Amino acid sequence: MQIEVNYPAAEFSRVQVTGNSTTGQTCGYVTVKTGYAQLKRTARFIVYIDGTAGPFVEADLGAHPVSQQRFDFAWQYDCLKEGYKL
């Protein structure tokens, strides 16, 4: 994930594994410094254990941008409905 957000000092919080060890995912929050002013930004992320999709980071913070609508759908069904506790 540090490579995905291009920030080796990324900070992670509220990290949880949902689903199972074969088709599950790791969901949580990542904080990075961005832009010229190096402002801290926090965004949700999803990393799929089987590598079939993603990783996804919302707010275009990842190297592979995904629409907010697509991210919200994945967060709802792959994190929350699979047991992520807020």
Image: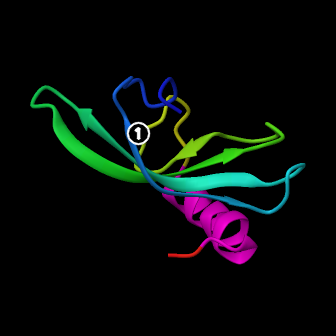
- Vertically, is 15 above or below 3? below
Along the horizontal axis of the image, is 48 left or right of 4? right
Q: Position of residue 21 (x, y in %)?
A: 85, 51
- Vertically, is 75 above or below 53? below
Along the horizontal axis of the image, is 29 left or right of 27? left
Q: Nearer the viewer, residue 10 or 61?
A: 10
Q: How is the image coloured?
A: rainbow
Extent of the magenta region:
67-84
Magenta highlight on residue 55? no
Residue designated by label 1: 61
- Vertically, is 56 above or below 13? above
Q: Residue at x 75, y 42 (%)?
A: 53
**Secondary structure of the residue carrying numbered label 1:** loop
Q: Nearer the viewer, residue 7 or 21?
A: 21
Q: Residue at x 20, y 30 (%)?
A: 35
Along the horizontal axis of the image, is 20 left or right of 32? right
Magenta span: chief secondary structure: helix
Q: Nearer the viewer, residue 69 or 13?
A: 13
Q: Nearer the viewer, residue 19 or 59?
A: 19
Q: Residue at x 47, y 28 (%)?
A: 2
**Residue situated furthest left in the rendering:** 37
Q: Position of residue 79 (x, y in %)?
A: 66, 66
Q: Position of residue 29 (x, y in %)?
A: 44, 54
Which amino acid lies under the numbered mark 1 shown in the image of this protein? Leu
